[in-house]
């Protein structure tokens, strides 16, 4: 039995749409820009209720990022919306110069990230975006795990100052964090345990919840930490947990290079070396398919997490 | 608006040109050609056309805003800002040196007063200016947003994304200018990648377009005044401003060779002899 139950099944992008609409009500300086994907990003409600603060940019993402940077001059808080691929790789230089280096208060909101985009295939399934964004100085990077947390993260960004990247996705996914507190930069320990720490974010948190149930049946006590904020990283939470468990597994819907695993590995190797395994896409592009089939084929299923935990525990000393 | 004092403005232009060549000579790097070519434009904007406050506030509410997209012409901007009172002219001597606020390309990172966004990687400034102009409209602020680009920069695709967007959204408080000097790093623009009929392109994109000579102070002031008259009528305004790269220093004029090259000691003396002015930093 999983320790968390899904109260509902919804897409994380709808959490973004609901959070953005809420922010629109709360703060008249919040503006939204979208590059011809209003429906896909679930920005329709904001557009309908705040038309004067909604900017349709057409299929021109570079311009959208520049516009957003410009709108901060005058006190606006722009939220840009398009797919994660077009939110990052396509506009990296614009984000780097006009947003991050210029310290602008732009919130880059990116949907359809990762393999779970599904049938559209590898052109759209970006698996490198977190790496690109976390490398930029000044950039906050958040990967929430479900509808409720994506909504909470979006609302939190309304009062956060500085450039930020919010990554979410397309598929309908279990909702299990309703009512849990969310703070940018503060890891959420969802399950306490003593044998191994699993650090997960995004859709992989639910995969880890399912893996934990299987591991509990085998008598393995898992500590599950939702590392929704990759930058700034909650270093204390990582060190305190691994001090107790002695080993860790990271789980992310991203390339093994440059993502959550890299960030955790850097912290452990610098401050408190411990065995670490990474559940991530192993330096390859994705392909078309059903989200859950893709997660399985590319090694991101609950069973893959179970195998990684068993492997890392064998590497523990004593 | 008071009548321009042309004698005073011409002296300022000479002073700024002198600053430019001394700055790039001082650090033996930087971009004198485009800077010299745009001097009258900067003088006109900061000393006659724009409502602006050297005490500098990032949001600039109630002020005219100015964005430089072709950031490599930072020497002319820095000198103009210093001469307009944004910071001490002595700071010009730190241009491109370690720990300076005067970065090679303009940046906000070191908090230099007068700069509102980093530029250098080309093609981004018009988008930023259009966004700032829309923020002004949202704020009920009736001042203008000015933006300068290079002509070689017109080869960047993002410029045309912004061009389409600004016209479609009737961003008519936006007054952009292209430094139309016909030169870029690798040679004449016509040879590198011809812009063909640039005026027709901007007209076709839905902008109000006018042309003037950027190295004649009277023409620049009249042109920018006229641009303000053309603005706020439903279309963004584009000024195609013909300039001579290197204008004011005879051996630098009209050639791409001085795009990004600093004068040596002898060349500096020859330049300063043509730019008589007394208030060096």
Image (cartoon, rainbow, N blue to C red):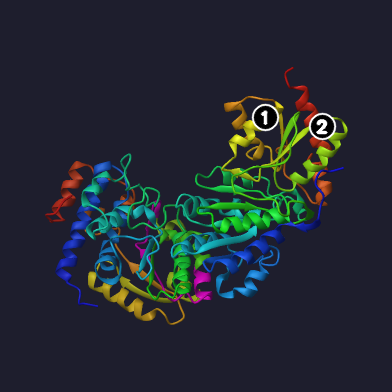
Q: Quadrant of residue B16?
A: bottom left
| Quarter of the image that includes the N terminus of chain B | bottom left
Image coordinates of residue B116 in percent, x first then y, are: 39, 58
Element assignment for label 1:
helix
Image coordinates of residue A43 in percent, x first then y, are: 66, 66
Image coordinates of residue A174 in percent, x first then y, are: 79, 53
Hey, which residue is sitting farthest top in the picture? A318
Residue in the image at 48% along x and 66% along y: B131
Residue in the image at 80% along x and 28% along y: A310
Residue A307, labelled with which disc?
2
- The residue where tag 1 is placed is A242
Q: Quadrant of residue A36?
A: bottom right
Spatial CA span between label 2 and label 1: 19 Å
Left or right of A33 on screen, residue B109: left
Tell whether position A318 is magenta.
no
| Residue range highlighted in magenta | B163-187
Q: Earlier in the sequence, mark 2 or mark 1?
A: 1
């Amino acid at each position: 039995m999983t320790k968390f139950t899904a109260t509902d099944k919804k897409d994380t992008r709808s959490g973004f749409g609901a959070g953005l609409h809420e922010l629109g009500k709360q703060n008249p300086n919040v503006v939204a820009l979208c590059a011809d994907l209003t429906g896909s990003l679930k920005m329709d409600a904001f557009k309908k209720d705040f038309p004067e603060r909604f900017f349709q940019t057409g299929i021109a993402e570079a311009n959208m990022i520049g516009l957003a940077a410009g709108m901060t001059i005058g006190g606006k808080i722009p939220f840009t919306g398009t797919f994660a691929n077009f939110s990052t790789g396509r506009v990296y230089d614009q984000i780097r110069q006009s947003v991050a280096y210029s310290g602008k208060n732009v919130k880059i909101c990116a949907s359809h990230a990762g393999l779970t985009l599904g049938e559209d295939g590898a052109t759209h399934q970006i698996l490198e975006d977190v790496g690109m964004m976390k490398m930029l100085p000044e950039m906050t990077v958040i990967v929430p795990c479900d509808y409720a947390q994506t909504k909470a993260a979006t609302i939190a960004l309304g009062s956060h100052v500085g450039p930020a990247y919010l990554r979410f996705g397309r598929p309908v996914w279990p909702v299990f964090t309703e009512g849990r507190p969310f703070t940018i930069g503060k890891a959420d320990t969802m399950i306490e345990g003593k044998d191994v720490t699993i650090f997960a974010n995004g859709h992989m948190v639910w995969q880890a919840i399912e893996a934990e149930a299987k591991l509990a049946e085998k008598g393995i006590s898992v500590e599950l930490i939702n590392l929704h904020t990759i930058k700034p990283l909650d270093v204390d939470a990582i060190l305190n947990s691994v001090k107790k468990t002695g080993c860790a597994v990271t789980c992310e819907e991203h390339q093994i290079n440059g993502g959550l695993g890299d960030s955790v590995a850097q912290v452990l190797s610098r401050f408190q070396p411990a065995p670490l395994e990474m559940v991530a896409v192993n330096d390859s592009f994705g392909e078309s398919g059903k989200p859950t089939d893709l997660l399985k084929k590319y090694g991101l299923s609950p069973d893959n997490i179970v195998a990684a935990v068993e492997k890392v525990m064998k590497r523990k000393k004593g | 608006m008071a009548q321009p004092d042309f004698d005073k403005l011409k002296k300022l232009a000479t002073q700024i040109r002198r600053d430019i060549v001394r700055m790039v000579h001082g650090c033996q790097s930087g971009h004198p050609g485009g800077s010299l070519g745009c001097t009258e434009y900067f003088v006109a904007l900061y000393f006659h056309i724009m409502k602006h406050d050297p005490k500098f506030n990032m949001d600039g509410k109630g002020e005219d805003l100015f964005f430089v997209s072709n950031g490599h012409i930072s020497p002319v901007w820095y000198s103009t800002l210093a001469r307009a009172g944004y910071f001490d002219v002595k700071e010009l001597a730190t241009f491109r040196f370690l720990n300076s606020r005067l970065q090679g390309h303009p940046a906000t990172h070191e908090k230099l007063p007068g700069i509102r966004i980093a530029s250098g990687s080309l093609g981004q400034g018009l988008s930023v200016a259009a966004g700032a102009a829309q923020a002004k409209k949202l704020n009920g602020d009736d001042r203008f947003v000015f933006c300068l680009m290079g002509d070689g920069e017109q080869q960047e695709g993002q410029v045309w994304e912004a061009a389409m967007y600004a016209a479609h959204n009737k961003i008519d408080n936006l007054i952009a200018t292209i430094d139309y000097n016909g030169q870029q790093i690798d040679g004449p623009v016509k040879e590198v990648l011809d812009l063909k009929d640039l005026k027709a392109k901007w007209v076709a994109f839905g902008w109000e377009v006018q042309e003037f000579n950027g190295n004649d102070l009277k023409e620049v002031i009249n042109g920018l005044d006229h641009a303000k008259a053309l603005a706020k009528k439903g279309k963004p305004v584009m000024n195609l401003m013909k300039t001579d790269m290197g204008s004011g220093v005879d051996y630098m004029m009209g050639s791409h060779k001085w795009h990004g090259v600093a004068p040596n000691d002898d060349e500096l003396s020859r330049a300063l002899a043509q730019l008589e002015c007394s208030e060096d930093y």
